[in-house]
Structure formats: structure tokens, C-alpha cells
Image (cartoon, rainbow, N blue to C red):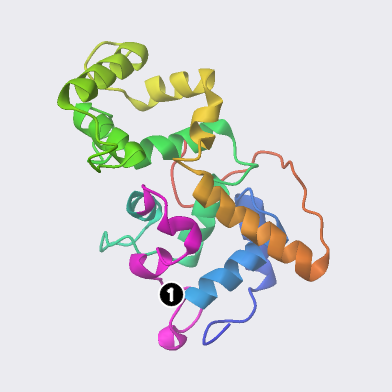
Amino acid sequence: MGGTSSKLPKDLLSEYQELTFLTKQEILMAHKIFSELQDRENGPYSSRVSMEKVLTLPELKSNPFRKRICHVFSTSDMKDGSLSFEDFLDLLSAFSDSATLEIKSHYAFRIFDFDDDGTLDARDLEKLVNSLTGETDDTRLTAEEMRQLISNILEESDIDKDGTVNLSEFQHVISRSPDFVRSPGIHSPVRRQQHSVFRAQRQAHGTQFRAERTEKRRFGHDVPS
């Protein structure tokens, strides 16, 4: 693993397993992947990895929300999108198959809230649509098409009719359409990162991972209970 710590302390491994939706094997594989992203001179696993390096992961390269994902999960005081190992675990945990729909929708909302003001307004929704459809001449919506689509979204989602979608309204919509947070354009590249950990570990050790886990307290961010 280069210049990083080759093993996680057992107490930390147990703590991470308790506070995330990840198995012991997934955490160890995540540590290996994170270590490989670090420069050799960066020191122990607690150092940060720049957003630029995180975005070299194949599973994130094609994700239209890749920079937003890094910024949402980063705890850096510099607001630079860099990730610590715990940030990286947090990301994988939130988008793992075992995470609850409430947590997935919570982070989907934060990723789509481009201006970080706690609501999805028309500007956020326009950026969301453009991120999903692309902004080439062949895929870009006309101004009228965009206006109508945003109007339709707000009509469906804006329960209190204030012109924006808040977290509660967003989660209400998601509760009726849970496949939304699993759609290929949004989260599956991140979920494939998790699946690649599963496959690599099975190939190396022949281990079958548990498909379900009980809900656990997360770390590092406030999440609605």
C-alpha cells in the first residue's frame, strides 16, 4: 500500500464497522483503495486525498455529479473536496446496498442542492437536469422544455408551494419512487465502486458478503433519524 499504513488498528476497524453499513472486508478493501490514491510521502491513512485524485477512480470519472459528491462528503476546512479515509468510508457507506433509503435520499438531496442553501430551487433543478441529460446540442433542452420540466417537477414535489423543494418534500417523493436514487444517471457509478470491492474481495478470499445489515449509527454527519 505504498507509504501508507498497511493495516488498520483493530479498534478502529471495529468502530468503522459499527458506525457504517460496511462489512469488515469492505472496510479493508476501501482502505486499500484509499491508500493507493495517496502519494507515498503523504504518511499514515489519516491524511487526505485531493478531489482530483479521488476523481481518477473509474467509477467516478463518468458520474455527472462527481465533484458534488466529493464536496458533500468532504470534511475539509478548506472546502476543496478532498477526502479523509473516514470521508471515503462515509461515501461508500451512504451509497452501499445496505444503506437505508432515508440516508440515500438525504445525500442525493445534498448533492443536488448545488448552492448548498438547503432547498432545491429552479436553478438547482436546471443544473440537475443538465447534469443528467448533458449539455451538448443533441441533448440540451430548449428554454421552453426546461421551463415546463421544472414546472412539472415543482408541481409534483413542492407540497407547501413556496417555489422550492425542501428535504422533507424530496424524501416524500423518493418514498414513492425509490428507484430514483438507484437510477444509472445518479448513483450507480458510486455503487459500482462498492461492487468492485465485493468482487475483488471474493476473488481474493472466496468470501460471500452479507446482503443485509441492521441499521447503524453513522459518523461524521448529522443525518435524520
Q: Which residue was labeled with disc 1?
A: 47
Queried whether the magenta region covers residue 186, the answer comes back as no
Q: Measuring from the top left, give residue 214's x and y in whole percent.
A: 71, 39
Q: Quadrant of residue 13 in the image?
A: bottom right
The x and y percentages for residue 136 are: 25, 43
Left or right of 223 on screen, residue 93: right
- Indicate whether 171 appears above or below 14: above
Q: Which residues are magenta?
A: 38-66
Please identify the quadrant where the N terminus is shown.
bottom right
Residue at screen point 47% across, 38% down: 223
Q: Nearer the viewer, residue 60 or 14?
A: 60
Task: Say whether residue 124 is visible.
Answer: yes
Q: Residue 97 location, x and y as percent?
A: 63, 43
Q: Is residue 41 magenta?
A: yes
Residue at left offset 42%, top offset 67%: 56
Q: Which of 179/166 is in front?
A: 179
Along the viewing direction, whichever of 132 and 31 lies nearer the viewer:
132
Q: Residue 106: which quarter of the image?
A: top left
Q: Position of residue 167 (x, y in %)?
A: 37, 27
Amino acid identity at mark 1? Ser
In this view, 22 is above or below 156: below
**Which of the 4 image quarters holds residue 197?**
bottom right
User: What is the crowding at mark 1: few (fewer than 14 residues within 10 Å), some, or many (at least 20)?
Assistant: some
Residue ID at (52%, 31%): 102
138 horizontally vs 36: left or right: left
- In this rendering, the answer to whether 86 lies above or below 219 is below
**Residue at image point 60% right, 41% down:** 99
* Residue that extends furthest to the left in the rendered view of this protein: 143
Nearer to the camera, 149 or 122 = 149
Number of numbered discs: 1
